[in-house]
Image: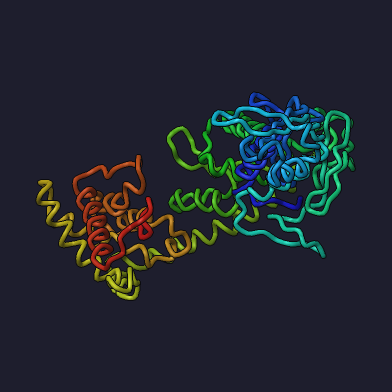
Amino acid sequence: TEELPPKALNNLGNHFAQSIAEGLEKAQLIDGTAQFTVYASPRRLAVSVANVKAVQADQHVVRKGVSVAAGMKDGVPTKALEGFARSCGVEIGSLKIIHDGKQDVYAHEFTQAGQTLAALLGEIINTAIKKLPIPKVMRWGSSTHTFVRPVHGLVALHGADVVPVNVLGLDSGRQTLGHRFLSQGAIIFAQADDYAKQIAEQGKVIASFAERRAAIKAALDKVSGSLNARVAADDALLDEVTALVEYPVVLQAEFEAHFLAVPQECLILTMQQNQKYFPLLDQNGKLMNRFLLVSNLQTADPSHIIHGNERVLRARLSDAEFFYKQDQKATLESRLPKLEHVVYHNKIGSQAQRIDRLQTIAAHIAEQLGTDRATAERAARLAKADLVTEMVGEFPELQGTMGKYYAVLDGEQPEIAAAIEQHYQPRFAGDKLPESPIATAVALADKLETLVGIWGIGLIPTGDKDPYA
C-alpha cells in the first residue's frame, strides 16, 4: 500500500490478522489452536497462519424434510414430499426416514465435497478488509474499490503455491516491493514461510510491528545509556514512530543550550508532538540539549540526516522561545480582563465570570480544609489566566503548567504557582492528585463549578470523559 495512517497502523494490523484467522477457522481450514503472526509496517499489512489446509474436509450432510405423516397419504407421496425430493435432486426412494427427536421425517443424506482454499480465501480477505476499523476510505485512479490508502500489490501463498484470488481489483502473486529507498528491487517469495526473513534481507523491511518496536526501544535504551541519560517518551510516541518507519535507525542529535531557558515541558512537547523526537533527561530529570531521532534510512554517513533534523528543530524551538519571552511582558493578573472574551459555554458565560465563581467556591472549601482562605482565593483568581498566553495558545496541553511558571516569574507565592498547575488534577482515573490543601481547594472548586454548571443547563454527561476538561 501507500503509507498507512501511523496512529492506526498497529490496530489495523491486529484486526486484519484476527479477522483472517477467524475466517479460516469458520471455513474449517484451520482449527482454533492455529498460530498466526501479525505483520504491519507503513506500506504493508500481512498475516502468516500456520497449518492451513489446502481443502476442507468432506462433510456428511443430513437435510431434513417433511414428516412421514405429511409425506405419505394412503401410501401415495404428497406434493410436499415430491417437492422435497425434487429440491434434493433425488428420487423419493432414495430418501431415508430418521427421527428428529420429535417425529419421523424424510431426510436426504449425502457427502459434500470440501471446498478448496483458493475458492474461499478471496471472500475471507474481502470480509476481513470490510471489518477493519477505518473511519474514512478513499478511491484511487479509475478504481471503484476503496481502502484507507491506495493498494498496489497482493501476495497470497500457501506453502510454495500462489493462491489465486482477486482483492481490491488486484490479482494475487508471489512478488512484492520492499523499502521505498533501500530495497534491492522486486522481492519474489518462494515459500510463504520465507516472508519475514526475505523481506528483511532483500527489502530492508522489518515487517513485524512488535519486532520493529522492540528494535527501536533497544536502540533508544542503548544510546541513552551511553550518555548516562534516560528517554522522555511514553508508549504512544514509541508506537507512532514504529508506525512511521520500516527499517529504523536511531541517531543522536543536539540543539543549542540556550533553548534550555525555556520551560522544559514546552521543549519536550515540541520535540515529541511536532517532530516525533525522543528528548533526553539527565539523572536529575532535567532536559539535556541532546535528543534521539529514528530515521527510516540507513546510510554510511548519517550526518546530513542529523543536521537536517537539527535545523528543523531549531526553528521549532525558536518559536517556543519567542512565545515564552513575549508572555513574560505581561503578568497573569494583567491578563484577566482578556478572559471576558473567552467563552467557556454560551449558556454559562465567559472564563472571567467563571473565575468569579471559582474564587468564592475555593475560598469556602479552603475554610473547610483548614487552610488559608485568601491564598486559595488568589490561586483560583489566577488559575485560568494562562489560557490567553501565546504559549498555551500554541500548545493547549500546557495549560496550568505555563501558569505555574508565569506565576513564579510574577513573584506569586510558591503555593499559588503549584495550585495553578495542579488544579486540573486528576484529569482521569488513576491520575496524580493535588499535593497541597490550597491546590486541592482550587481543584475541587474547578470540578464542582463545572458539574453544577453543566447539569444546570441540562447537559447531562453521557460518556466517560469530561468534554470541558
Q: How is the image coloured?
A: rainbow
Tell me, yes or no, if residue 90 can be seen here. yes
Res. 405 image quadrant: bottom left
Q: Position of residue 240 (x, y in %)?
A: 60, 45
Query: Which residue is found at the position 80% from the left and 35% from the top?
Result: 115
Query: Which residue is found at the position 28% from the left and 52% from the top?
Result: 423
Query: Which residue is found at the position 74% from the left and 62% from the top?
Result: 139
How many marks are shown on the rendered structure?
0
Q: In the displayed structure, does residue 323 sit left or right of residue 449?
A: right
Q: Position of residue 417 (x, y in %)?
A: 28, 53
- Does residue 14 lie above or below 462 as drawn? above
Res. 431 image quadrant: top left
Q: Where is residue 425 in the image (x, y as percent from the top left)?
A: 31, 48
Q: Nearer the viewer, residue 444 or 156?
A: 156
- Does residue 344 lie above or below 48 as drawn? below
Res. 433 image quadrant: top left
Q: Where is residue 125 in the image (x, y as percent from the top left)?
A: 73, 44
Tell me, yes or no, if residue 45 can be seen here. no
Q: In which quarter of the image is the C terminus?
A: bottom left
- Does residue 400 lie above or below 100 as drawn? below
Q: In the displayed structure, does residue 199 sit left or right of residue 225?
A: right
> For the view shown, which residue lies furthest in the bottom direction?
341
> For the view shown, which residue lies furthest in the front direction?
74
Q: In the displayed structure, does residue 3 sit left or right of residue 14?
A: right
Q: Nearer the viewer, residue 444 or 157?
A: 157
Q: Nearer the viewer, residue 277 or 449?
A: 449
Q: Which of 52 and 57 is in front in this view?
A: 57
